[in-house]
Image (cartoon, rainbow, N blue to C red):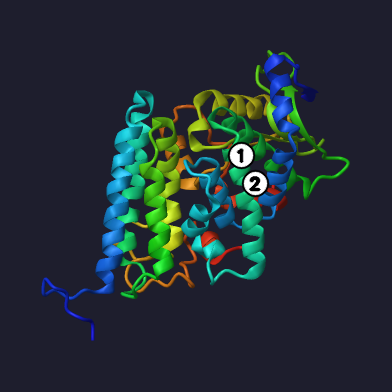
Amino acid sequence: MRFQDAARDARAVVYAGIQADPLVARAATLLAEATTAERLLARAAMNGERTDPDVWRRMFPTLFGEGAGEELRRHSELVLAASLEVANRGEASRSQFRGAIVEELTARLLAARATPAAPIRRERRVLFDGVRAEIHPYDVTVESGTRPEVYDCKWGARGINAEVLNQLDDAQVHAADEDVDLAVAIVVMDARRSCELRLDRSTANHANTRLVALESLDELRETKP
Amino acid sequence: MVPLSASGRYATCVNERERIIERAAASYRALADLAEAIEDEWQYVTDLVEAYEPGLLALADVGGGRPPEPEQVAAVEEAIAEIELISDPHKAIDWLSTFPHVVALALGGDVHEPVGAGGNSGGYDASEPDDDSPFRALLLGDR
């Protein structure tokens, strides 16, 4: 088994431009340091109809109200500003920015435990002996020689589908055939329960695929799937 | 003493909490109706509503009889206003997942508990969420 850079087709080139936008890095940095409530604010505001910040301040009194601490209010303001910048990019661009932000956030959280022997990489494929190469690259990989990890990232639970689950499960099975303990996971910027509902209805095998939902993103810093 | 309302019933704080939750639940059902326009997602929409609506309704019992703070009511009103603006059924599906948690966060509850279950019903204190609550981090803050 080995990792390989994904082919740079036209779609990848366009998407790379989104991934390189400074707004993606800024939002991911803020969300990596955010509370779960701030992450919920980001999910809501990036997908909202209104872009007046006062609307969102009123909607989240635990972040902006009198009871919130000064540090939390200050940080929440930064999260809100970045989220509304995404929303202001327009409906067509929003989904691309949101997807890129979840990927970057995942990479940043995983980076807390990266080592020279287990670097964090982006847009990588996994090749197995005698197996046809996968079409889609993995969003984030931890390329450890002893316990490699692959992550697929989604903005919402609706992104969980049979194709994604089958690819992750197949990779885990093929790695096991080579005596490699490959950890596979799907990271979703959505409520765990919504993700579990989606998984419960899926006929694709996902018994060995870990779910990392909005409430548990910080687990990426410390634990391996 | 709680003043009597014009109808002769006690105008209790519970009524204010129930009123806002009833409005939230009605808007949530309307959002689900919009989301059902995506035929391929009908089952998921149904699953979301069945999963979250009971917990949303149970938020009427959060707080142990204490009146909701004005900022809590305003927060839920804003959340309702937000989903009532949605016309795209795809976005409606996203908000079927998000809205209950926004309302729960505002009211200090947890939409994961079914109606009548222990957890957050009656006397629930948002400052001391159940250890088993999946949204404990959300309620307490994890900064």
Q: Nearer the viewer, residue B78 or B24?
A: B78
Q: Is residue A149 visible?
A: yes
Taking the view exactly as shown, the residue that stands out farthest to the right is: A116
Q: Position of residue A54 (x, y in %)?
A: 52, 55
Q: Nearer the viewer, residue A200 or B129?
A: B129
Q: Amino acid at mark 1?
A: Val
Per the model, the C-alpha gap separating discs 2 and 1 is 6 Å
Could you tell whether A9 is left or right of B4 in the image?
A: right
Q: Quadrant of residue A147?
A: top right
Q: Which mark is residue A82?
A: 2
Q: Position of residue B90 (x, y in %)?
A: 43, 31
Query: At 43% across and 59% down in the image, what residue appears?
Result: B75
Element carrying mark 1: helix
Crowding near pointer 2: few (<14 within 10 Å), some, many (20+)? many
Q: Is residue A178 visible?
A: no
Q: Amino acid at mark 2?
A: Ala
Crowding near pointer 1: few (<14 within 10 Å), some, many (20+)? many
Q: Position of residue A106 (x, y in %)?
A: 68, 42
Where does the N terminus of chain A fall, quadrant-wise?
top right
Against A168, is B132 above or below?
Answer: below
Element carrying mark 2: helix
Residue at mark 1: chain: A
Query: At 49% across and 72% down in the image, what residue appears?
Result: B127
Do labels 2 and 1 touch, CB within 8 Å?
yes
Q: Which mark is residue A86?
A: 1
Against A20, is B14 above or below?
Answer: below
